[in-house]
Image: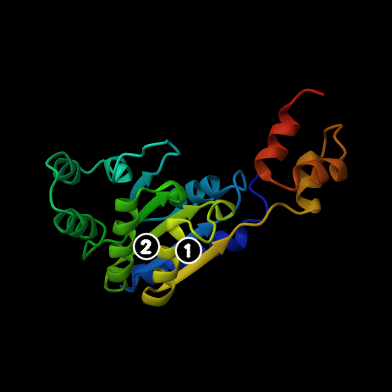
Amino acid sequence: MDMLERDAALAEMHRCLRQADAGQGVVLLISGEAGVGKTSLLNRFLAECDARVLLGRCDGVATPRPLAPVFDLNEPALTQLLLDEAPRDVLFRAVLDRSARRHATSVLAFEDVHWADEATLDLLRYLGRRIAAARSLLIATFRDDEVGPRHPLRTLLGDLATNTPLHQVDLAPLSLAAVRQLASGTRQDAVELHTRTGGNPFYVTEALAAPG
């Protein structure tokens, strides 16, 4: 399926990368409901960008492992610090150092931070407050419909908004025109499909793939 109505979001992501490449690090938040295409957008951007990529993911498990996304970064030195239970300030500084190389731009991305444990949120806060002087783009994706007033992520977002060079991309569901384009050549009624799915890209593609 084509990625429709995401050109503006991709352009903003590349603007942030150019800013980081100029030595002015930035935090980029990508928000939207489940299935709206945050991961697809991030994957497209990472495939297009000419930068060193570090990618970690948060999982929606009942008891998340502290700093689990750092294991995903596949950096042996960081993994060893985790296994050695190094002090948090030592580990956080090491993550910053590896995402802020002087002669190369880095993209450090954390997916689904609405599921992040408290230690990972502390890491994001630490990085966000120090990213401005680095050639680094810090990206965090989250489901905004799961972040209520008392959600721990809400406090972090407030801190980042006041202490960090911050950009945000809010992904909206697809318009009727986009759904009509996706449904072209099928027997599905685009108006009904848009109404039933709310324009959510995941539900649209699943409905189009389902026989009948």
For residue 40, which quarter of the picture?
top right
- Residue at image point 42% right, 57% down: 152
- Which residue is pictured at 39% across the width and 51% down the height? 110
Image quarter (top left, top right, bottom left or bottom right) of the C terminus: top right
| Residue 1 seen | no
Classify 10 Å Cα crowding around label 2: few (below 14), some (14-19), many (20 and above).
Answer: many
Task: Measure the alpha-carbon separation of dots 2 and 1.
Answer: 10 Å
Instruction: Please provide percent x and percent y for residue 201.
Output: 67, 44
Residue 16 in picture, x, y percent from top left: 44, 67
| Residue bearing the label numbered 1 | 14
Residue drawn where x is 82% and y is 46% of the image: 195
**Between discs 2 and 1, the one toward the N terminus:** 1
Q: Secondary structure at mark 1?
A: helix
Q: Is residue 158 above or below residue 97?
A: below
> Dot 2: what SS?
strand
Which of label 2 and label 1 is nearer to you? 2
- The amino acid beneath tag 1 is His
Please, which colouring scheme is shown? Answer: rainbow
The residue at the point 14 percent across, 44 percent down is 85
| Residue bearing the label numbered 2 | 137
**Which amino acid lies under the numbered mark 2 shown in the image of this protein?**
Leu
Q: Does residue 32 appear left or right of residue 131 in this picture? A: right
Quarter-wise, where is residue 61 in the image? Answer: top left
Residue 197 placed where, x, y %?
75, 42
Residue 142 spot, x, y in % from top left: 50, 52
* Left or right placement of residue 17 versus residue 105 in this view: right
Looking at the image, the residue that sits furthest to the front is: 150
Quadrant in which residue 202 is drawn: top right
- Quadrant holding the N terminus: top right
Outermost residue, bottom side: 162
